[in-house]
Every structure is written in C-alpha cells, then in structure tokens.
Image (spheres, grey):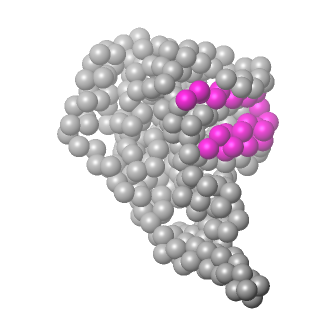
Amino acid sequence: MLRRVLRILLILLVVPPIVSVVMGWLVAPSFLHPVRRPLTPDLVREADASFAHSRAHREDFPVNAPDGALLRGWKVRPEKPNGAWVLLFHGVADNRVGAIGQSEILLAAGYSVVMMDQRAHGESVGEMATYGWLERNDTRAVIDALVATEHPAHIFALGESMGAGIALQSAGIDPRIEAVVAEAPFASLREAAYDYAGLQEYPLLGKTLFAPGAWMMLYRGGKIAGFSAAGVSPERAVAARSFPVLVICDEKDTTLPCRHAKMIFAAARGPKSLWIVPGAFHTAAIGFAPEEFRRRVLDFFSRPGPEPVQEAR
C-alpha cells in the first residue's frame, strides 16, 4: 500500500513538469506570432467618428524601424493642441484602434497622440513580436520621426498590457519620454510566463509544478527570436532610469495580476503612483472608472513628477 502511494506521489510530481516542458516547447512559436487584428474599414470609420467628435485630425504616420520593418500608424491632432504629444501603445493581438478610448480623453484635453500598430500587429510589418526587445528601438525611431516633423514640447507615453510593458521599456532607454502611464503591465517576460503556465488562474502552479514549461517556452522562444527573455523586463527598465510612472492595476485581473504592477512600482526609481482599480478586469480601468481614469491620467501628465505615493484603492 505504501509503495502504491509513493508511486502515485512520484507520478504526480514528475509527470506534470514533463508534460509542461513538452507544452512549453510546442507553444513557444505562438507567443512570438500573436493573432493579428486587422485594421478593417469598419475600425477606421469607428476611429474617424471618434476623431470627428473630438474635432481632431489624423494623418498617416509610416516609420521605418531600425531593422527595416515598416511600422504604420497615425498622428492625431486636436483642434487646439497644447504642444504635448502622447504615444499610445495597444495590447497584444490588437491594433492602434484598441487605444481609441484613451485617445478621446487626451485629444479633448489638447494633447496630440501617436497611435502606432506595434510590429507584427495590425498593418505594421515584422516577423514576430518581442514584447519590448525590438519594440523599444521601434519607439525610438517613432520619436525621431515625430521630433523631426512636429517638434513636440513634451512627449509622454500611455500603454496597456503588452503596450504598457513596451512603453516602460522604451522610456527606460529614451529620456525624451518624460512620463509613462502603464495599465496592467507585465513585470518581466519570465514573470508573465508563470501566469500563462498556470493557465492564468493558478500562478503558484506556474511557479512550481509547471515552471519547467514556462522556462522551456522562454528558452525556445528566445532561441527562435534571437533574444534573451531576461532582457525583456519593464521592472528593470524603471530601475534603470528615473522617470515618473503611474502604474494602474486592475483588481480582478487574472491575465497579468496585480503583483506585476506592484513589482514595477517597487522597482521604480522616479516619482511613482499606483492605482488599484476595484472590480476591474484586465485593461478595463477606463470602463470601470472612466471619470477617475480621465482625472488621474490628465493630472499625471499635467505635472510630471508627482509626489511618490501608493494608493491602495
């Protein structure tokens, strides 16, 4: 009887990690090639209706990335621009129109916005998404083009999920980005892999029994893409350069739970604020608390360098 129990325990301890390693090997290519959300005529009409309501004007904004990939997006100006520009970063498997709600708030307040499709997303070229490894240099090229054509008085960034991570990593290497609003960011690619290994419901399993699968996914993905997963880390980016950050955590987020935002908040060297949105799901702060979202974002951008404060609710 004892041997049978020990055999069962051994199977339970050995089989899940082995299975997770196999799964990690198989799914590695897919996280580098997220499903594209096409920029359809209906989405463009939706965006144009939003811009018309804000009395804003858009123009195409193609930018060549350092590796030659063509990035496509829009520059959008309000009727009475205040001279500041905000770079908007959408989430994974989305496109530039995914940030339309945020653009409405900013345009109404006089901010001009840049809405790009990230590489391997929307209409932008690129063989694969690297979650900030290449995208941070893409952002630098976008800023170069913006500075050359618009001479902005200030440049800020706002992103959600993958886009939040890219925005933070971009600001970590480019001091022209003065402040960042990051909703539901990932602390690092490795930390996010634990959530995915735990099926986005059981992160503890992702860090224990299924951890070998997360490691394998990152190892193989890095080999395919030619980068180290350890180098993709918004947490390290905020520690590398001091800049103001407003980190937004959605309380009910299971995709990228609040521990990611809290890790980034703890690591940030510059002025920082953390807003935990009660009841909100992944990237849903603007839907759950639209007026407070608007107030906090505009207040943050109007005074880069807020007093360091953590707000529990």
Q: Residue furthest top?
A: 80
Q: Which quadrant would the N terminus be assigned to in this image?
A: bottom right
Can residue 27 be seen here? The reply is yes
Give how far across and how far down residue 68 sits, in percent: 43, 58
Camera-side residue of 128 and 63: 128
Q: Is residue 167 above or below residue 101?
A: below
Magenta span of residues:
257-279
| Residue at the image position 29 percent from the left and 30 percent from the top | 47
Q: Residue at x 34, y 54 (%)?
A: 36
- Against 290, residue 210 (above or below) is below
Q: Where does residue 168 sit, x and y in percent of width and height?
A: 63, 41
Q: Nearer the viewer, residue 277 or 164?
A: 277
Give the quadrant of residue 193.
Answer: bottom right
The image position of residue 242, as x and y in percent, is 76, 35
User: Quadrant of the image for the C terminus?
Assistant: top right
Magenta span contains residue 17: no
Measuring 48% from the left and 25% from the top, which residue is drawn there? 288
